[in-house]
């Protein structure tokens, strides 16, 4: 191969690489991993109604209490802010955990204390991989197992509701996060809450074998335990 031909080949490869769909330039976050939300928040009122539209006279979908039944502070995911005339948030649109997945509603901005999201988890269901994003950089990724046919891991935007050591449940591995997503199997513990957890059967990582939960190697879930907080967003894409 002559020098001229080799140089031309390099140029062609560079053009094809730059045009490859879904590929981000060096230092950029892949489009699939981008997240456009306000952040996560704790509730400052004792109780706040979640309404169908940003209006105090609008129908209430449900009411959030400031604390969970076990006295933990309730954390919600804030999707969007509606500013008032002064430019400050007047209402927030929040995600509603529960069936059906994907519900949301509006609460007064004064009812929440919001923290911007600087980290989130991306689940690539088809590729059966996870990516953990911290300050707009993918800092860890790895293989996962996802829901079996008929019980798929649900697509959408969710968040971590709590984390725990699954004592007496070896199937959940070294650690587990309960999310705001629900699987197709309502008879599963907790009414079908989708978990992100470790595993005692690492040979099934990379396969579609769960009831909708996301299984990781124990080494990966132990890492996430140190960096994932209550309220951390989880983006599940096809």
Image: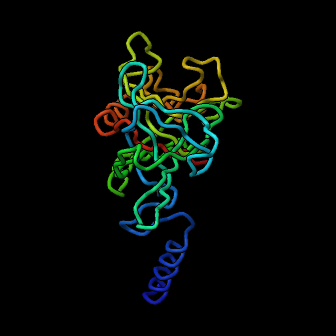
Residue nearer the viewer, 127 or 197: 197
Q: How far from the left and from the top, in percent, is residue 190?
A: 54, 19
Q: Is residue 108 left or right of residue 208?
A: left
Locate residue 29: give its quadrant: bottom left
The residue lying toward the viewer, choosing from 109 and 157, is 109
Where residue 62 appears, x then y in whole percent? Answer: 58, 33
Q: Name the quadrant containing residue 147.
A: top right
Q: 145 or 34: which is nearer to us?
A: 34
The number of callouts visible is 0
Question: At which x and y percent is residue 198?
Answer: 42, 26
Q: How far from the left and from the top, in percent, is residue 32?
A: 52, 56
Residue shown at 35% from the left, 56% from the top: 137
Asked if 192 appears above or below 83 in the picture, the reply is above
Q: Is residue 225 above or below residue 82?
A: above
- Whether residue 167 is visible: yes
Q: Is residue 124 visible?
A: no
User: What residue is at 43 percent from the left and 54 percent from the top?
Assistant: 38
Q: Residue furthest top?
A: 168
């Amino acid at each position: 191969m002559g020098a001229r031909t080799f140089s031309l080949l390099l140029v062609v490869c560079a053009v094809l690489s730059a045009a490859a769909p879904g590929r981000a330039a060096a230092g950029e976050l892949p489009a699939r991993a981008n997240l456009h939300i306000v952040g996560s928040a704790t509730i400052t009122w004792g109780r706040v109604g979640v309404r169908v539209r940003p209006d105090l006279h609008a129908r209430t979908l449900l009411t959030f209490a400031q604390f969970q039944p076990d006295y933990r502070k309730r954390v919600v995911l804030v999707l969007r802010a509606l500013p008032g005339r002064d430019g400050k948030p007047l209402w927030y649109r929040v995600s509603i955990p529960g069936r059906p997945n994907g519900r949301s509603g509006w609460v007064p901005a004064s009812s929440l204390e919001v923290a911007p999201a600087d980290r989130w988890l991306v689940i690539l269901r088809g590729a059966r991989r996870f990516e953990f994003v911290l300050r707009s950089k993918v800092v860890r990724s790895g293989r996962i197992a996802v829901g079996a046919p008929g019980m798929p891991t649900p697509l959408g935007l969710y968040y971590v509701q709590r984390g725990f050591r699954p004592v007496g449940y070896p199937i959940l591995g070294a650690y587990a996060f309960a999310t705001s997503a629900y699987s197709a199997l309502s008879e599963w513990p907790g009414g079908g809450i989708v978990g992100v957890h470790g595993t005692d059967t690492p040979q099934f990582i990379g396969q579609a074998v769960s009831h909708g939960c996301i299984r990781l190697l124990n080494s990966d879930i132990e890492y996430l335990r140190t960096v994932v907080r209550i309220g951390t967003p989880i983006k599940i894409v096809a």
